[in-house]
Every structure is written in structure tokens, then in C-alpha cells.
Amino acid sequence: MKLSGKLGGKSSLLTGNFLLLITSWVLMYSTQPIPDTYSSLYYLKLGATPFLLSVIFFAGSLAVAFVQFPGGYLADSSGRRWLIVTMTFGLALSYLFFILAPSWQFIVLGMVIQNLCLVYQPALLALMMDSLSPEKRGAGFSFYSVVTNLVSLPAPLIAGVLVLIFGLNLGTRVGYCIVLVAYLLAATLRFKLKETFSLNGGNLRPKLVEAFKGYGKCVRESWQVWKVVPRSAFHIFVSSTVMSGLVIGCMIYFVLYSTSVLKISLTQWAIVMAFMYLSVALPTFLVGRRTDAVGRKSFLVLGYLLHVPAMIILVYGNFYGLLLAFFLFGFGHMIQVNSSQVLLGDLVPRELRGKAIGCTQFFLYLAQAFASLLIGFLYSFVSPQLPFFLLAAAAIPLAVYVWLKVFDPAVKEV
């Protein structure tokens, strides 16, 4: 209680829905990075090629993009809670495909099912924005980042131990088993969430089939949001879409490049990932506190620019260089994502947040899908260094675009 009082100031930050979400994320983020540490190498063991890694993520990204418009529409028409709880259970069970996969094709199937369950993402982000007052929104999102980074810290080390004991194949499957159990516990915990918005005044179960039948209506109503909200929100949507596609595409190949080109051992890679989670936690929280006082835009720009030195150091790095590269990457990526989400919360009214987030997420994941294919092609058939140089080069004009087009609102939405 004392800690939550400090974090919240006059009124506690760690209460109600926000506390429940943080607790569920502790369960999820403390375990998910275990198999993720070596997931690309695991898929290669199941018969994939370096280029097929991009195909796997292309399929997953298309699936999650497809459900964002209906997810946003449902969040604003039937409320947030039921969708979040139900689909968290579906997300948990999808890990069975990763545990039992005899080949990389089963990974594709599991990833598609898993990402279809992420129809709840707009509702989850909207509920989090709803549950934080405007003057604490920056601190809340940053506290979420700090907690998820700190609890993720042991995961790469645990992955390294599992691989040393069981080998890459079985060790990664054991990691996925741990994730399955943790996600089931998180889904059960989310039953306690309270609805924050519903036009019908209750927790009416969303009509999923009708939402998908009326897909065109969902798209039209979601796109209309950009005509109502301030233009800064649209510019955040554009810049985030481009940047996220490039970042996620490069992330697929971080472990492969580090181990095959830079000759970093699997144990050293685990240490690099653990160091990243540890080193970015405190700076991210401090930045979040500052965004509530001085504004979000400048930190969004900083987040973009930090990708430039991060990628250059990565390309030419050794073990110690990677420690610095992934500190800069992790810190930059975290404050970029947090600042853009907080700004959307400030700019978009509560009754439109689900649609705005759903529209943003749709194009964001669509960009990730096609950027993954592009980066996979460049990595596999042109030069393994080129994708990372591309990300560094794109970050600069995107930062300038945000600086010129995005403005902190004088009055923040509640």
C-alpha cells in the first residue's frame, strides 16, 4: 500500500483495474520471453529457413491485423471486459501448437490462432487508458513498462539454462509449457476486471459473429474517427505504423544475426537480453514521470532517434557492443511505444478509443506483415546487415515528421 501511494501521489495508481492488469502482465511477461529468447532458432530446427521465418511472422501479423477493426468496434459497442477475459483464455490455449509442433507449419497455424485471439487488444488498451486519470497516464504506462521489463529479466537466463539442460528443441518446448500455465492463471485473474465503458450500461457479451459479418461497417466507423479527433492523433498513427513494421521485422533476425554472423554464443545472447530488460527499466519509468510534467512529443522523437546508434552498434558489434546496442534499442522502443499510446489516450475521447486503437493496430500489424517479408528477403538474399541499416535510416525522417506534425494537447481527454 505504501508503494502504491507513492506511485499514485494523492490517489493511488496501483488500484482497481490497473492493479489487476499489472498483476496479470507480471504472470505473462515473466514467462513469455523464455521461449521467445530462442524462438527463431527453434523454428529453424523445425525445418524453416531464414526467409521462411519472415513468412511465419507475415501470416501471424495478417491474422492479428484482420481482427483489429472488429475488436475496436466491439470495445466501443459492447464494452471491454468480456472480450479481454475470453480471448486471454484462447491466447493461452494457442500455445499448445508451439509445444507440440512437429514442423514449422504447425507454428504458422498456432501463430494464426494466437493472433486471432488478439481481437481483444483494442479493448485492453482502451480499458487501461480508461482506468488511468490524464495526469497519471504517462506514469501509468511507464510503470507498466518498468514492471514488464523487470519481471522479464530472469526469463532469458531461464531460457539459457533450459537449453543447456534439454537442448534447443526440448528446452524451448518446456518454455512454452511454462507460458501456457502462466497465461491460464492470468486469464483467470482477469475475471475480476470491472467494465469501464459500455453503451448498454452493462457487461453485454459482444456479438463476435455479427461484428465480423459487418466488417465493412466496422472499418468505415473506425476510419471516421480520424475526421473527429485532432490531426496529431492521425500523424501518430502514420509514424507508428511505419516504425513498428520495421522494428518488428528486424526483431525476427536479431538472434539469428547475433549468433550466426557475430558468433555470439546462446549463453551470451541470453545475457544480452537479460541486460536489456534490466537496464531500460528505471530510465523508462523516469521518462514516463517526466512526460506527465513536460509533454509526450519530445520523448516520442527521442525514442525514434535512439534506434539509429542502436542499429549501427548492432551491425558491427561484439558481445559488449550488443549490451550497449540493446540497451539503446530497448529504451528507445519502450519510450516510443509508451509516448505514442499515452498521446493517443490524451487526444482521443473515451467513446472513440476502441475504434481509434483498432484502426491503428490494423495498419500497424499490416505494416509488420509486409515489412517482415521485405526484411526477410533483404536478410536472406541481399545482405544480413541491410535490414538494420534500413531501420536506422528510416528513424531519422520519422522523428522529423513527428516533431513537425504532432503536438501535445492543451486539454487531455479523461
Image: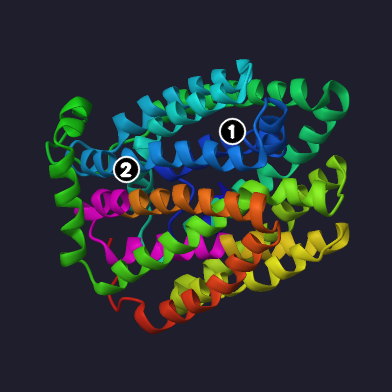
Name the residue carrying label 2.
68
The picture places residue 41, in percent across and down from the top left corner, at 72, 36
352 inside magenta stretch: yes
Residue located 32% across and 43% down the image: 68
* Residue 8 in view (yes/no): no
The mark tally for this picture is 2
The first of marks 1 and 2 along the sequence is 1
Describe the element under mark 1 as helix, strand or loop.
Answer: helix
On residue 353, which mark appears?
none
Name the residue carrying label 1.
27
Residue, far front: 381
The picture places residue 247, in percent across and down from the top left corner, at 56, 57
Measured in 3D between alpha carbons, the distance from the residue under mark 1 to the one under mark 2, in whole angstroms, is 24 Å
Q: Which three-letter amino acid code belongs to the residue tagged 1? A: Leu
Taking the image as shown, residue 239 lies to the left or right of residue 325, namely left
Nearer to the camera, 360 or 311: 311
Residue located 17% across and 44% down the image: 218
Depicted 311 relative to depicted 272: above or below? below
Nearer to the camera, 1 or 155: 155
Nearer to the camera, 227 or 85: 227
